[in-house]
Image: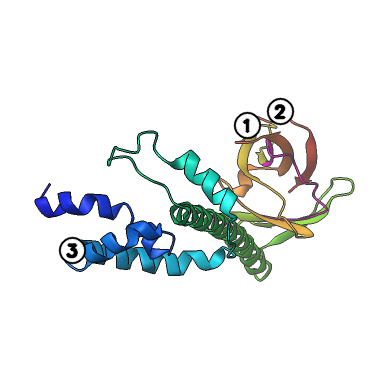
Amino acid sequence: MSMNNDLSHPYRENLAAYALGALDKGEIPALEQHLQTCESCRDELAAFRLLGDGLLVAIPPRQPSTDLRRRLQERLSPRQESSPAKRKWSLGQIALGAAMVLLLGVSLFSVHQVQTLQRQQAALAHQFNNGQTALAMLAYPSTRTLPLNGGNIAGNLLVDPDRNVAALIVWNLPSLSADQTYQVWLIDPQGKRTSGGTFQPEPGQPFTTVSIFAPKAYSNYSGIGVTVEPEGASAAPTGRNIFKVDF
């Protein structure tokens, strides 16, 4: 540490309080005299003032009572008054700390809002892509439209064997708990089931659109089924059947 930094050390501790107008009057003359000859302290003081102007506007001004100020100083004052290395916390420094905590809280809330918006945008993009697939399939002359058979659940299965794609359009599909998912099964003529993927109902939408891409040509399958499975999918059907569509 340089000699100049050694001389500045006892004054640097009071710069934040001085910038906020909370430094004890008895300490102000010595600090102002030091600032006339110390460029680094002047730069640091300017930074404190800039920070204070931006943050403290969020805190309504309130003049503490004389008794409250005295009790706070007694609690925060060092036990050994003769030791110059002990830090004296002033009300200005406490206010600055509170303002920084407030700013941190606002920043964390903003990050959460941005993440929520990003998730919503991703869900909308997924829904839009599935809807575009269904619309494109309806334009193909080779697409077959098959009704669903699932009690109160209504909808259609669109199958285009030439392009080996299929899409489900399902109405009134119940929402599931966080640890469950719907899973599509491709069923061959022998009854063997191959997973066709998982999906969840579209939040806030009356219907759900799901694209299904089979690992083999649809001529190898006789239908599809949908069951409720644990989150992350199952190797074979384990939950209740929701509906089945025969080709």
Inspect the magenta stretch and tell me whether residue 178 lies in it: yes
Whether residues under marks 3 and 2 lie with C-beta atoms below 8 angstroms apart, the answer is no
| Residue 247 magenta | no
Q: Tell me, for residue 170, which label it has, or none.
A: none
Quarter location, residue 83? top left
Asked if the residues shown at circle 2 and circle 1 are in contact, with their CB atoms under 8 angstroms apart, the answer is yes
Secondary structure of the residue carrying numbered label 2: loop
Query: Where residue 118 sits in the image (x, y, percent)?
Result: 55, 59
* Tag 3: amino acid: Cys
First in sequence: mark 3 vs mark 2: 3
Residue positioned 64% across, 65% down in the render: 137
Q: Which mark is residue 234?
A: 1
How far apart in space, not on screen, are marks 1 and 3 (Cα)? Answer: 71 Å
Amino acid on which the number 2 mark rests in the picture? Thr
Residue 38 is labelled as 3
Q: Position of residue 219 (x, y in %)?
A: 62, 47
Nearer to us: label 3 or label 2: 3
Q: Measure the C-alpha gap from mark 3 to mark 2.
A: 77 Å
Q: Position of residue 131 (x, y in %)?
A: 65, 64
Q: In this picture, which residue range is highlighted in magenta?
A: 168-183
